[in-house]
Image (cartoon, rainbow, N blue to C red):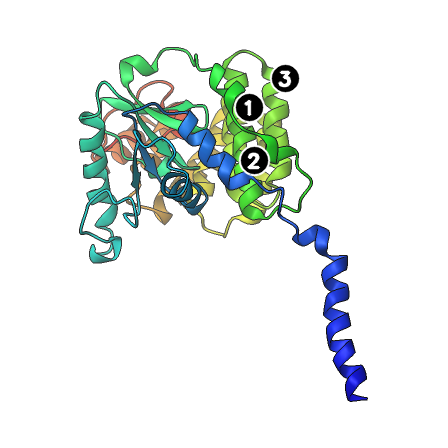
Amino acid sequence: MVGVLKVGCGVVPGMFLILNFGVSDQSRNYTAYEHALNIFRTTATGDTLLVNGDNHFFPLVYARVVEQMREGTAVYDRLNLIFKMIPGLRESDASPGEWPGLRAEKEKAIIENAHPRDVFFVLFDPGSILMPPSYKVTAYCLLHRVMKKEEAEKPYRVSNLWRYYATENFYEPFTRDFMNRQIHAHFRLRYGQFLFASGDGNAGLQSVLEASKIGFDDSGVHLAAASVLMNENLLDQAREEMDRASSLFPKGSALLDNNWGCYYFRLKDYDAAIRFFRKAAEASPSTAMYHRNLALAFRESGREMEAAQTLEAFSLPLLQTGELQELIIEPPQEGR
């Protein structure tokens, strides 16, 4: 009897191991390696990478330390863990709420002293960036490139880099976890953004919708997809993405409320836009972007006095035409 139990204890786990080998086999999973390779292929010697998020950071740690990729490119970790931006300081050493300001000052110094080389942010959500007033962040293939405002007005002209990106992992048959799907989905989102900018709207839409399907359980993917589609005035498709994002976001999310406000603003339903922008501003009163959007919605609805009061209460400058369109996918400027 004991012998039978011993055999059973070996056979039963072995049976499940064999039956689920296809699920567990990750031998063809090159996602992290190719992602790091693509990031470094977007840079040149002397450039600077400011990195945020595990799915970016750890592939780059491996690529730099083990593979010694692009050693002429400076890499900084925005959480100051390994490739430190501020040597000797840990994020936990800063008082609550102090670290974003310290990081912004360091990033400002890096940006202002980078010329003639480029500075790139490596992150999925550019909303955490605080830029010096004369600079802005623009889409640059998989990365976000820091540019002088006057230079950023030029059309999106980067094309060849997409041809040189490694994408073998996207087509390999293996079970993909959240990390793999997030990287793949954001790749499709950024490529769709490029296709829209290059004039191929049908292919751009297809790429964005494919990203949404790949990142079906990723609220950030759906919110980013909605933003791209809103900027292309594809409001029906944007509404579907906003609904998907809403089903995944926690209630009371200021970011989600802000983007609903942007959606209704595009529909010219300013009362609904005001309602959502106000909710976002109340949930996150220190975020200038939400107050600026609220003021713009007030102004567009003819409520000039309330727009002025909103700006005055937050010491914000006057709004310019089209500013909401910038803020829906671009980060706010420092001190604004």
Residue 185's tag is 2
Q: Residue at x 23, y 48 (%)?
A: 99
Q: Residues within 10 Å of mark 3 (few under 14, many from 20)?
A: few
Q: Is residue 203 left or right of residue 111?
A: right
Residue 50's tag is none
Decide which of 174, 186 is in the foreground and name it. 174
Q: Residue at x 23, y 18 (%)?
A: 116
Hey, what amino acid is under mark 2?
A: Ala
Decide which of 119, 252 is in the foreground and name it. 119
Q: SS at mark 1?
A: helix
Q: Tell me residue 140's x, y (percent).
A: 41, 23
Q: Tell me residue 55's x, y (percent).
A: 46, 44
Task: State if disc 3 and disc 2 touch (CB < 8 Å).
Answer: no
Q: Residues within 10 Å of mark 1 (few under 14, many from 20)?
A: many
Hey, what amino acid is under mark 1?
A: Gly
One can see residue 302 in this view? no
Q: Residues within 10 Å of mark 2 (few under 14, many from 20)?
A: many
Identity of the residue furthest to the bottom in this view: 1
Residue tagged by mark 1? 192
Residue tagged by mark 3? 202
Q: Count up the numbered dots.
A: 3
